Amino acid sequence: MSINARHGLPFLPGNTFRDVTKSAYHRSQTLAYKNGFALPRPPTLGIGQDPLESTQLAYNYANELSSETLSLYTEPAGRATTQEFIPAHVALDKKVLRFQGYFQQNVLHSPDEEYRVRPVVIYYHLEDDSVCVMEPAVENSGLPQGKLIKRQRLPKNERGVPYHWKDLNLAMDLAVYGVVYRITNCDAFTREFLESEGILVNDPEPTPVDPYTSHRTQPQRSHVSPSNFDHQKQFLTMDRKVLRFFALWDDKDTLYKETRPVIIQYYLVDDTVEIREVHQANSGRDPFPVLMRRQRLPKTIREDSESFPRCVLEVSPQEVQEYYSPKDFRVGETMRLMGRTLRLYDCDGFTKSYFQSNHPQVEVKRVELPRTEEAALEPEREIPPYNGFGSLEDSLQNCLSLIPQPPKKDLIKMLENDHKVLRYIARLDSNNPHDEGRHFILSYFLASNMISIFEKPTRNSGIMAGKFLEKTRVPKPGFEVDKPQFYSPADFAIGATVVVFGHRFVLTYADHYVLKYLEAESDRIPSHTLESLRNRLGVHPDQGTGSNPPDESKGDKGVVEPSSQGQELAA
């Protein structure tokens, strides 16, 4: 019997047959969700039901449902209305709790660091209770940074219970996968959310500074505006000008409590100070060249740099408020320089003149020292008497140094007076009758202050003429051998007697160049010397013979040709 055939039979017991083609036996849902409310579904047409009956049942069910639904909205005013239901994944979508924290990473086998402090940001997604840990990227850090833990539910214990937002708070440790994260702070939304849920939020903590990062951080550059002081003018005006003070180093902290003499030199060109120790012979001390090298001495250090180890490291200009100046060195006062006690008792002549012109209020007068301290000073070396061998200057060099050096010469005087010679005619003043009629030419060399004597030949005299005295400095008679005075052009007047190593010469004549030169230097020449030359040469003072100095541009330097010299001096 076919299936279609049963539709024609009345719906009575015994008139139905099992459908052998049916394969699904599930029960249909009777409830459905609409706008968040669970509502029963309308009945569907069943197999074997009359379509008209099914339609009538559906119509009655719809009317009943509409009346029940209307009653839900027309409840009494005393009852509260039911709010609209919103699922959690919709209400908490894109809402994230943000925490700041850090963790310490131990560094092994490194002499520069023991650990590193690595800051992190912890994101808690309220939608599905998942957590993500991020580390802010730092340029040139050398560490793999960025996402440390991808978004997932983090286990809280060994049973695998995940962390919940109720377990998070500030100033607490978060242990995840063997790493302990310290939560230090959070943002405003996170604090407001936790406080709205009744959680008391702890006070934030500061994140510790990474010692290695702070060690590598370059200090901030400080710029100092340049001063208006003209250092170039100081260099040009104060070069090679040094203030020299004599002081005593009171070294009472040592075993023997000695007092040593030192010399303090202040260089005005750059305001630097140098201290030299005065070495004594056979003192048993190593002869160090300087006690303190040349440098600028700080007088006042800034308050924030008082703890600076000045005995080990040099003080930079940024840490010094004031340096020592010349007015700080006062004779008679005690100073403390580089941990040494120095007492100034005297200074040299240039220092005194400098203070009188620049700092007249500072008194620079020598302070008398006790005898015990005077003995500590180096005694003056006594020069032995002149033995008569060689010149006095050459013999003196043997006493000044072990290896004698040639005496210094006045090069400027030698260049200015080169080839300038003053010539005189002299006769020998002697009791020997054979010396009568002998004539000599005395030459005075202005470049070296030396005298040479040449004897003129006399026919049938029996005396060999020629050089009588080589160029040498002739001392005046009546002075000590160690402190001689030598002849100068002011002593050569006509008629004067010149004693040359026991020989007496009387000047009788001079050439015109001598008069010209002496009149040019009239402020240093006695008047009787000039008058004797004018009278002998027959020159009146009003004439122009000696009014002008010799013209060096024309070659008139006092050198007379031999022919003219013989004619002039023979007259």
Image (tube, grey):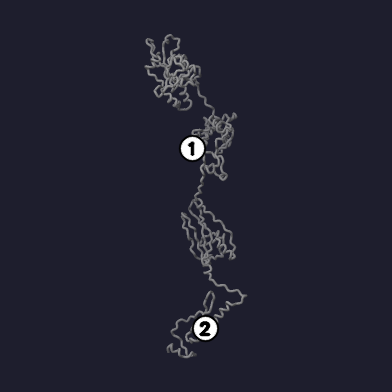
Q: Earlier in the sequence, mark 1 or mark 2?
A: 2
Labels 1 & 2 near each other (Cβ < 8 A)? no
Describe the element under mark 2 as helix, strand or loop.
helix
- Quadrant of res 182: bottom right
Question: Callout 2: 10 Å neighbours few (<14), some, many (20+)?
Answer: few
For this orientation, the residue located farthest to the top is 433
Assign the C terminus to one quadrant of the image.
top left
- On residue 203, the disc is none
Image spot of residue 436 (x, y percent): 42, 10
**Residue 59 badge:** 2
Marks 1 and 2 sit apart, C-alpha to C-alpha, by 114 Å
Mark yes or no: residue 80 visible: yes
- In the picture, the quarter occupied by the N terminus is bottom left
Give the labeled residue for mark 1. Answer: 232
Amino acid bearing label 2: Tyr
| Residue 255 seen by the camera | no
